[in-house]
Amino acid sequence: MIDNLFLESPHRRWNPLKREWVVVSPHRTQRPWQGQTEDTSKPQSLAYDPTCYLCPGNTRAGGHHTPDYSATYVFENDFAALKPDVPNATIDIANAGLLRAHTERGICRVLCFDPRHDLTLATMNPAAIRRVVEMWAAQAAELGARPDIQYVQIFENRGAMMGASNPHPHGQIWATAHIPNEPALELAAQLAYLAEHNQQLLSAYLVLELAQHERIVAENESWAALVPFWAVWPFELLLLPKQNVARIEDLTSSQRDGLAAILKLVTSGYNRVFDTPFPYSMGLHPAPADGAAHPEWLLHLHFYPPLLRSATIRKFMVGFELLGSPQRDITPESAASTLRTAIAISNKEPQ
């Protein structure tokens, strides 16, 4: 267990996945707040919204027709950030290695989780979430098999506070020709740890967390959800499989069931923290799609929710966080305790 000194005093924590320090300031939780607060008023939600371009049978913003789907639905993003047919080109102005650029190919897709407009992962039943997991795996396998793709990033932005442009339950899949910054940092850290310790970084970390159980918020036979020791966001979560697996398409049927179940637990628990639909950005980090085995890599999921003290007060990454180091106020241990209580309450409610 962590010493009380570190629960009460300013200190730094090491993030081995990104190889950077995080400042923790538990004494700041009592400071008054006179900054921005968020509007929590919500319009009435409908099972079907005739104005929503993701609801079955409607016309999307780009003019394409959304079919009358009954489970999940995937389509190419009408306003994709990346394109698969961009010509290869590079520049290095003055050959100084400073003003460099190269074109980037990629594929961007949208995955509708459910035909109902008024659902979220928190309110979908486990069988419906399991279908989403299955589609994630199928998309990762298909896109990752392409020779022009090196990484498949699956993610969801939930809530207007996190930039979601449509409340219909959906996520995105971006497949890129190069490994993006965040997984590239994690790749370097995991390779270095394996070389030095002859074991997976995240597998070794999970053993420690399961033994202490101080930051574990939920678990089942195949998955554990925890507030990372080095968490930056107030109620950040890391989901880890208990068995060695590098990519979502490699999950067994029972592991996929377990992932669906724990996604239901943590998202419904989030909603009970402040009794409001919880915003977050969530994403899967699989091993690169380069055909290599990647023994250093353990598949994992990140949840980054912005809410700090209430449904109306969010954490801003500004000032010292942008110019110095990441910083948080409430300790990961305190956040884990809050989330365990919220998950226990939500788990008792009728589904």
Image (cartoon, rainbow, N blue to C red):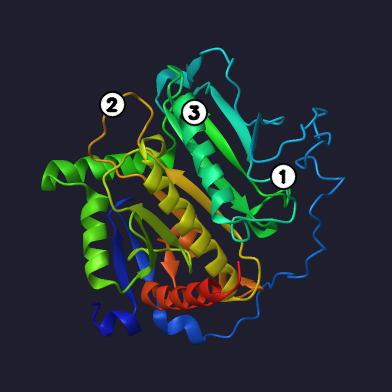
Q: Which mark is residue 339?
A: none
Residue under numbered circle 2: 292
Of the residues under marks 3 and 2, which one precedes in the sequence?
Answer: 3
Of the residues under marks 1 and 2, which one precedes in the sequence?
Answer: 1
Question: Looking at the image, which residue is at 20% across and 42% down?
Answer: 192
Of the two numbered discs 1 and 2 in the rendering, the one whose residue sits closer to the viewer: 1
Label 3 element class: strand
**Splitting the image into 4 quarters, where does residue 131 fall?**
top right
Residue under numbered circle 3: 176
> How much space separates mark 3 and mark 2, taking CA atoms?
17 Å
Question: Looking at the image, which residue is at 71% across and 31% down?
Answer: 79
Of the two numbered discs 3 and 2 in the rendering, the one whose residue sits closer to the viewer: 2
Of the two numbered discs 3 and 1 in the rendering, the one whose residue sits closer to the viewer: 1
Q: Residue furthest right?
A: 50
Q: Is residue 45 above or below residue 97?
A: below
The amino acid sitting under disc 3 is: Thr
Residue under numbered circle 1: 115
Circle 3 packing at 10 Å, graded few (<14), some (14-19), many (20+), is: many
The amino acid sitting under disc 1 is: Pro
Q: Is residue 337 above or below residue 86?
A: below
Image quadrant where one finds the N terminus: bottom left
